[in-house]
Image (cartoon, rainbow, N blue to C red):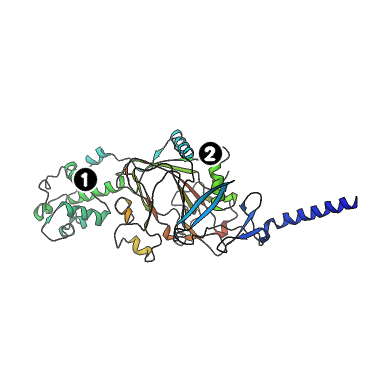
Amino acid sequence: MAFTFNRVFIFLALFASAQASHYTKDHCAKDEHGNEHCYKDEEDEPCFYEDYEERLYQWDPVERGYERQLELENGKFYTMRTVAVKPKLFEIPNFLTAEECEHIIASAGIRGLQSSSLFFDKFALANKNYTKGHSKQVAGDFEIWDKNGDGVITMEDIKQFAVNTRFLYLKDEDITEMFKEMKLDCFDDGEISREEFDTLNSHAINEYMAALRETHPRFRDRYSEQTWLKQDEGADSILRNLRERIKRLTKLPTRIIEGGEPLQVLHYDVNGHYHAHFDGQSKKNLANLECCQFKPHASPTECRLCRYITILYYLNDVEEGGETAFPVADDDTYDHNSFVRRQKGDFYNMSEFCYNSTTVVKSERGKAVMWYNHNLDEHGWLGDRDDFALHGGCDVRKGEKWVANNWIPAPEYETRHLESMYAV
């Protein structure tokens, strides 16, 4: 009886010891680069350190081309390859199966997609009242148009004016159509002389270009269709399983993953694109705004995007174009202020300058691309935006493009106790 009691006592003591160490460094391990991580044995989930504080996890990119084998499902391994170090950018081929890709596309179709660009009413544009005459501003200065000083304004001069004043990249047919729609015949011979220019309705031309830039799908910052799919307990098994895979991939606590935004599904036709942009916003520029995941009824100008991680999934093979470009990835000469001023060109424009980017990722069905939009602060929580995470979607030149995004917002140290509005 004593022997049995002793065995039970020892077992209980060992069990209690194991449970107590669940949240200590006794159950943490270092990876191949000396980074220490802690997991609950039965859930493979980051847990608490000795100070009982959670921390966000970031994979070490090591170097371009570095590969890891990750077991993201029981017995199933995935290759994660480093694409860039700045930002921390990775790709995982075959992250989704063909069946999963088709299921997400079909689910988006059932849900219904909405245009993420404004409707372009060509008829309204053509019949707008352009009667404001000769501009007294930049558009009314002949020398601004006639850059080479040859005394006439040509097709190339008009293209350059549009780029310099509107970051608008016109084709010959766009310019021909503009003069036709505005009922101006001064360009019938392909040139505008100084005498013709002095009476030209240049203010209206400038307005027309502004309208193109803001409303025409080809020239807007974004041209696509989109919808959102939930991944909570009410979602189907494929979408729920994808979220579990994400949890293992990111090594983030369950509450952070469940606080992620719904899955965004996007469809791009020919000329579909998304000019270079950031998924997160800088706190140093918007210090007075809270993270959007804690502001359920806020407008886009009343909160700050705190999307810690972006995971992009390619759902089909694009016939031509449709890549994801990172214009300044691993560019040691990159200066964000100079880039914003476009001193070397408008490299935000993915329609014109996609392939000038330092990193371009091909759209291949099933592949996932993951990157960190923010660095970590000294406490291991959301830090400031990583300006190297600038990215965009190149023009679809042939065929169509289907992608999906998982955006995972995270709190800053001061708000780490708050719950995301996206959590169930």
Q: Residue 9: percent from the left, percent from the top? A: 83, 53
Q: Quadrant of residue 183?
A: top left
Distance from label 1 to label 2 (Cα)?
45 Å
Q: What amino acid is found at the position of numbered circle 1 in the picture? A: Asp
Horizontal and vertical percent position of residue 25: 66, 61
Quarter of the picture containing the C terminus is: top right
Say left or right for 23 vs 71: right
Q: Is residue 227 above or below residue 31?
A: above
In the image, is 423 to the left or to the right of 208?
right
Residue at the disc numbered 1: 174
Residue 238's disc number: 2
User: In the image, 91: left or right of 209?
Assistant: right
Say whether residue 134 is visible: no
Report x, y in % for residue 290: 51, 55
Mark 1 Cα within 10 Å, few/some/many (few <14, many 20+)?
A: few
Which label sits in the foreground, 1 or 2?
2
Left-right relation of 53 to 387: right
Residue drawn at 9 percent across, 54 percent down: 195
